Amino acid sequence: MRRLLVIIGIEGFAVLLALYRGLGAVHTDEAKYLLNIPYPHPPLGRFLINLTESVPHNEMIWRIIFATLLTQAVWLVAHMAKRLKPENRLTLCGLWLFSASVMFQSGTIMMAVLTALQGLVLVWLLLSQGNKRRLGWIALFWFASLFTAYQAVLYLPIVVAIFWKEKVRPLHMGLAIGMPMLLIGFYVASNPLAAASFISAGEQNIGQSLIHLLQTTTISWLWAGSAVLSIVGLIGILKGKQWALLLSFVLVCAFHITSYRMYYPVLFLPLLVGGVVASPQVLRKSASLLALQIVIAVYVFAHTQLAFYETGARTVMRQVNQLQSNGVVLISGSFSHSWQYESTSPILHYKPALLSKAKAVVCLDQCPGIAGYGFYQIENIPQEVWVRR
């Protein structure tokens, strides 16, 4: 009964985080997954999300699912720490729940969340015994991880270490680990949009100084575990001589340097947990560490700009979707996939020649020629919007 109450309490925490994330609007990358657009990631995750396309409120359903997965993963953390002292085990669970990456990325429909959870499973397998009988399932899990998001390759050293620890023959290890990577390579080569996203991501940080990139990566690492878990986790990796975790940590850092996104810090999290489990001595002052973690988490949450308001895309499209007329929606200027997700009508780039087919025009930029087509402008709305009379 006590465990059930804890599960319900954690789930309430997850739902609150998901509701907060749903107050604003769909992020452009979230829209790509909800619309099943074939980039930037492989098909598995977005295919599963797209299965509920016709379900009412599917966005909020997936926000709650993602938040639930990330917060309830604390039970796997507790299982990993079962050999630790009870107070240290409880502390590690608290460090997980009050890490900034859990609080701020729960409820985001991002593949980085799933990849981090897959990384946590791999770390659990690395630190556990008796993997000989489930090596086939581990290979299949590695395949599924790669086809969920390319970033799963950052945990390659952990997968190699799992097979190496079980003394798997090099040929079998190469097939189990290398074949999924070869297949994902074929997928990228056959998908121009995926290849283009690779190039775009690789060019993102061009022109920035190395000092700035290192500062950004350091902040991301500290943010991942609200500083406390970040520091004790890395110390645990070094003291426990967990070279596979350290190599993955270096890969995640290198990935941040070449292609940083605000939702990548969570990729550090499973490695930090593994470091603490491998070297529990880092939790000698467990009560003080957990108290400090909670204080930092509250401070970060209090000093973060919370968006309890809708974005322009959601506000505008709610008005446009209520129109009784049929036709496409034209948008002048650059717009993200979030506009496509919010609209119930097809969206096209603005061209005067298409005005005869349009029921509404959103002017994020200049809209030349619109005055002569019988449109009138909606007032009291964030963007300039014209609808057909």
Image (spheres, grey):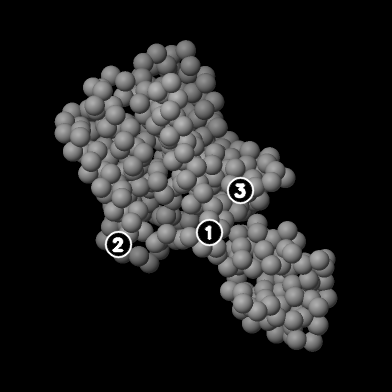
Q: Residue at x 46, y 32 (%)?
A: 8
Q: Label 2 is placed on what type of residue?
A: His
Label 3 sits on a secondary structure element that is helix
Residue visible at 26% across and 43% down in the picture:
293
Q: Between residues 362 and 178, which one lies in front from this camera angle? A: 362
Answer yes or no: is residue 194 visible. no
- Mark 3 and mark 1: Cα distance apart in space: 12 Å
Seen from the viewer's position, the closer of residues 97 and 330 is 97
Q: Are marks 2 and 3 in contact (CB under 8 Å)?
A: no
Q: CA distance from mark 2 to mark 3?
A: 35 Å
The answer to whether 335 is drawn above or below residue 17 in the figure is below
Does residue 81 appear left or right of residue 32 in this picture?
left
> Residue 258: x, y in percent?
40, 54
Residue at the (53%, 59%) spot, across then down: 24
Q: Is residue 53 above or below residue 389?
A: above
Drawn side of residue 323 relative to residue 6, left or right: right
> Label 1 amino acid?
Gly
x then y, percent, for residue 196? 57, 56
Q: Which residue is mark 3?
A: 59
What residue is disc 1 on? 24
